[in-house]
Amino acid sequence: MRTRKGKPTSQRDRTTPSADSTEEQARQSLRYVDEMCYQRKKLSTFPVGRPLEEASGLQGKFNRLVERDRDQRLSLPVSATLSSPSLSHSDDCCEDVPALARVSVIGDVTLSEDALSLLDLGPSFSPVQSIGHGVTRKIVGSLQFVHDRLRHRASRKEQETGREHNTGTTLPPIPFPARWYNPQEPNMLVDTKFRLFTTSVFFSILTSYCKKPPISNLTPAQRRGLREIRELSAQGEIKISTSDKGGEFVIISRELDMAITKHHLEDETLYRASSAQEFARQYRHLNKVWVETAKAAGLNKATITRLKNDRPECPVLYVLIKTHKLSPAALTSKDPRDFKVRPIISVGGPTDRISWLLNVILSPLLKHVPAHLRTNMFLERLRAARVDNECATESFDVTSLYTNVSNEAALQAIFELLSENHTSLTLHGFIIRQVMMLLDECLKCAIFRWSGHYYRQIRGLAMGQRLAPTLAIAFMSKVEQPVLERNLFLYCRYIDDCCIVCSTQFELDTCFDLLNQQSPHIKFIREKPRDSWLPFLNVQVYTSKGECKTKWYRKPSSKNILVHSLSAHPRKTKKAILGNMFATAIKVRSDVQERANSIKLAQHIAHTNGYPEKEWTRKSGRLPRRRNLTADDNSKIAFCLPFISDEMSKKVRASLRKADLEDHVRVVDIPPANLNTQLVRNRLYDRLCVTPNCVICPFGKDWDCMVSGVVYLITCQSCGDQYIGETGRPLCIRIKEHLDGMAGSSMTTALGGHLAVFDTSCFIDFLEKGKHIEE
C-alpha cells in the first residue's frame, strides 16, 4: 500500500515542528521501538519458568520473586490501614482523622472488593507505563519542541534583547496555541549538540529500557478491579467523579446522577432555558467587542487573533456531590433531593482566553483588599492581634458564595479598586472603561449545555470561570466594609471563610447580623470554638484566658489522600509532597506540645498513604530543605519526558550534560495518566458535535469531529492511497476544506487532485488524537 504524507494547505494547520535534523532518527527509533515491543510481547506469551534463548532462567526467577513481594505488599487494601488496630495510631492528635472509607459509593451501585481496593488508592495514583508507541511519540514531540526553541533562541540572541509590543508593556506567556507555526532556521552549533542528545536518548537510553518490562504497581486483584470499573462505565451503568471536598472517588449510578442534576437545574432563580442560536450570538458579539477594544488599546494583531476563539466549545455542566454533608442513610438513597451538589462549568468556553488577559490585569488588585488572605498571612495577623480574657472568637462561612454573588455589585467593586489603584497596575494599553466593558461582556456569556439542552445562568458567577475567584473576592470586600470600620481585634477572610476576634460576644453577634444584612442572597453561617479550639482553614486556633495557640488541623470532610507511595511518580515528587506536609505541620504549631501533636497527625496521614516509617521519620524533626527555582531555571526550555523510572530520568539528564545543553534545557518528568484521568469523564451526556448522522465523526470512536489538535488519516477505498494530515483547529473545519476541494476537483488540494485523477471516493479514520490517554 502506498503512503503519502499530507501537506497542510496553510501554515496554521501545522501544530508540531518539523525538526529536519531529527526526523529520520525519529522514524528509525519508532521502528526500533516497535520491534522491541513486539519481541517483548512475544516473549511474554511463553510460561515464565520456561527456558528461552532470549531470557535467562535466573532473570525469570528474579522477576517472579519481585512480583510475589510486590503482591504481598499490596495485598492489604489502603482503606484497611485506617481501621486496622495494628496499623492505626491511637494518639489523641488523630481524633480529627476519622476512620472513613476512601471511596464513596452512592445509591444502589455494587462494586467488588477488587474494584474498591483499586479506588482506595485515590484519584492521583498513576499505574506504571511501558515504553510503547504512544510514549515514544510523546518523546519525539518533546524533542522537536526543544529543538525548535533552541534554534529560536540562537537566532534571537544577537538580534533582540527583549520583545516589544505596541502597548509598551510585555504580556506574560500566553497559554493558548498560536494559529500558525514558523519553522526556525538551522543553526550548526545548536543542531550538532541536539543531535548528540537525541542519539543518546534514543539509541542508548530508550532502546535499553524497551528491553526491561516494567513491574506493575497494581496487584492482580486491583487490575481486575480496573477492568470491572471500565466495563461498568462503558456500559453506562455508573458515573465516576471525585467528591467536593474529600478528594476521594465517588461512584454513582448514571440514572441517579442525571436525576440529581435535573433537580438542581429546576431552580428558576438560577437558570433558564437557552438555545444554540443564543450561544452563537453571544460569542460572536463577544469576539466583535474584543477585536474592536483590543485594536483601540494598541495590541498587536497576533495577540488579538490568539486571544479570539472563533469556534468555541459550549461549556458543559457537571456536579460534584458534597459527600461530607451526607448521612450514612443518605448514601443508599435514590431521592435526588437528599443530595447537595457543587455545580461546575467546564473550561474552554468563549470567554476563556479573554478572561485570562483580564485576570492578568485584575489579579494584582487583590493585594489592596484589606481582609483578603494570601499564603501564610493568617498566622502573621493572628499573632499580631490583641487577645484578652474577654475576647470572643468565631468563624463565619458564606453559603454558596459564587452562585449568590451580585454581578452588578462585583463590577462596582472592581471599578472602585481600579480607579483607586490604576497607577500601580499594568493595564497593557487598556483604559479602565475598556477593561470594565470586556468584563461586563464576559459575565453576559453564561450559557452552558447539559444532556443536549442549553441553559443560561441568570444569577451569580459560574464555578470554573477564570474570573470567578477575583470577582468574588472583590464583591466580598464590599460586603465586609461596614464590619472593618468597627476596628475589631481581627477580621480576615479567605474567599468565603472569615475568622473574627472581637472584644466581647455581643460585638461578635452584632458583626454577624451586620454581615447578613449587606446582600439579599448572601447568608453567613457561624462556627463556635469547641473546647476553646476553633478550626479555620488548616489551623486550629486557641484564644482563651488571654492566650493564643495554634496547631495543624485537617477537616473531618478530608479523606487525607496524598499521592500514594507506590504511584508511578518521580521519587522527588513524593518527597516534596511528604516534606511539604510535615513543613506545614511544623510551621503552624505555636509551642513544643502542639508541634508534637501536629507531627503525629502528619505521620498518621503518611502511614495511611503507604509511606514506610523510614520515609516520614526523617522528616518529623526538621523542616525540609527547599530548592527554589532560580530565574535561570525558569528560563530553561522544558523537555517533557514521560516518566518511566528515576534511573532513566537520571540518565537523560546526564545526556543533557554531555551534549552541553544543561544550561539551556531542563528535564520535566511527566507521570503516567492517573486514575482520575483514566476513569473520570465529565462530558458524559454531551458530545461536542451536534450534527445528526455526521459524516465526519469517525465510527466507533469516543471523540467526535469538534476535537482539535489531531492527526487524521483519509484512505481511498479503491486504490488504498492514504493522506495523513494534522490540524490545530477543530477537525470538522479542516475536513470540510478537504470535502470542498473534492467537490470542485481542485488540483491545488491533495484530495481534489486525487479525485480528478482516479475518480474514486474516500472515507475518514483516525491515526492518533492529540490528547490521547494511554490505557
Image (cartoon, helix red, strand yellow):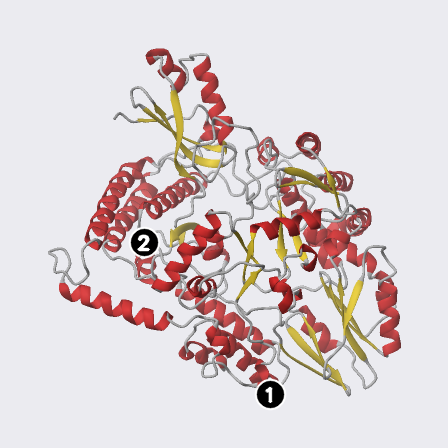
Nearer-the-camera pick, 239 or 759: 239
Q: Which residue is mark 1?
A: 593
- As shown in the figure, which amino acid type bears the numbered disc 1? Gln
Q: Which residue is mark 2?
A: 130
Q: Nearer the viewer, mark 2 or mark 1?
A: 2
Q: Position of residue 307 (x, y in %)?
A: 60, 37
> Looking at the rendered structure, which numbered label has been put on residue 207?
none
Q: Position of residue 341 (x, y in %)?
A: 66, 56
Task: State the image quarter where residue 380 is shown.
Answer: bottom right
Q: Residue drawn at (72%, 49%), measured in percent from left and top?
A: 461
On screen, residue 453 versus residue 155, left or right, reads right
Q: Residue drawn at (50%, 40%), measured in percent from left and top?
A: 160
| Label 2: element kind | loop
> Does residue 463 sit above or below 174 in this rendering?
below
- As shown in the figure, which amino acid type bears the numbered disc 2? Ser
Q: Residue drawn at (56%, 69%), measured in percent from left and top?
A: 559
Asked whether the viewer can see residue 218, the reply is no
On screen, residue 679 versus residue 137, left or right, reads right
Local crowd size for mark 2, using a 10 Å CA cut-off: few (<14), some (14–19), many (≥20): many
Q: Residue drawn at (32%, 69%), measured in percent from left and top?
A: 70
> Does residue 638 sit above or below 277 in this rendering?
below
Q: Position of residue 216 (x, y in %)?
A: 33, 61
> Does residue 593 sit above or below 518 in this rendering?
below
Q: Position of residue 656 (x, y in %)?
A: 33, 53
Nearer-the-camera pick, 69 or 47: 47
Asked whether the viewer can see residue 697, the reply is yes
Image quarter hosting the N terminus: top left
Nearer-the-camera pick, 402 or 650: 402
Labels 2 and 1: the sequence-earlier one: 2
Distance between the alpha carbons at the discs numbered 2 and 1: 47 Å
Q: How many marks?
A: 2
